[in-house]
Image (cartoon, rainbow, N blue to C red):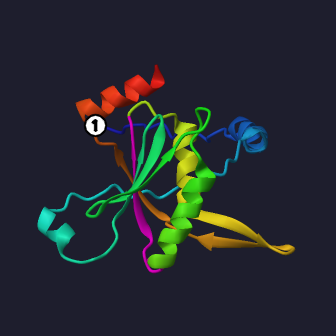
Amino acid sequence: MRRRRLHKDPAHLEITAFINLIVVLVPFLLSTAVFTRLAVMDLNLPAQQSAVEQIKGPELQLEIVMRKDALEVGDRIGGLIQRIEAREGQHDLKALQALLVQVKGKFPDKREASLLAEPDTPYDTLVQVMDAMRGTVTAEGPKLIRAELFPSISIGDAPVRGAAAALAAGKKAI
């Protein structure tokens, strides 16, 4: 017995409509795409070190504590260097930079600093203080000279004030 088989031709894919769609869609998507430039700031969180490692050398471990009423500049081992009171509700960034220039003069190789802020510190204020810590610009004649202060900034939470200090700060505000 003989069997008859039907010979079918393979179906051809009709992709012209798809190509037309791609030809129109790709330029439209490219023309409407938003290309953004992201500014990324590298931050280092302070590492937990034992007290023995902190006391080993006479190196400076600069720490700036942001409070609502002042900036406290100090050394983690040596204690408070200077307290810069806020003026009219704003932190005195020029006084901070002047102090940091003096500190940089004593420790020219030091690049690291820690910024410890209270939890309710506004973001804008935090960035302004970080910019003041990172570098300064001075004018010498017609030239502007940029000086690097402490560009490697670590961020953390400010230590809680003692009850006596908080009470004294509360009395000043009244």
Residue 36 forms part of the magenta stretch: no
User: From where the camera sits, is residue 154 visible?
Assistant: yes
Q: Is residue 111 above or below residue 44?
A: below
Q: Residue at x 51, y 34 (%)?
A: 122
* Magenta stretch, residue numbers: 107-118
Q: Quadrant of residue 143?
A: bottom right
Out of 162 and 16, give the one closest to the viewer: 162
The quadrant of the rendering that contains the N terminus is top left
* Direction from residue 29 to residue 128 in the image, left or right: left
* Direction from residue 32 to residue 9 in the image, left or right: left
Residue 110 forms part of the magenta stretch: yes
Out of 83 and 24, give the one closest to the viewer: 83
Q: Residue at x 63, y 54 (%)?
A: 94
User: From where the camera sits, is residue 40 visible?
Assistant: no
* Direction from residue 152 to residue 149 in the image, left or right: right
Q: Which residue occupies the extreme top position in the image?
A: 174
Q: Residue at x 55, y 55 (%)?
A: 96
Out of 82 and 38, give the one closest to the viewer: 82
Amino acid beneath label 1: Val
Q: Which residue occupies the extreme right position in the image?
A: 142
In the rendering, at what x and y percent does residue 95 appear? 59, 55
Q: Residue at x 48, y 36 (%)?
A: 69
Q: Secondary structure at mark 1?
A: loop
Out of 5 and 108, give the one closest to the viewer: 108
| Residue ID for mark 1 | 160
In the rendering, at what x and y percent does residue 31 appear? 79, 43
Q: Quadrant of residue 166?
A: top left
Total marks placed? 1
* Direction from residue 137 to residue 73 in the image, left or right: left
In the rendering, at what x and y percent does residue 8 appear? 53, 39
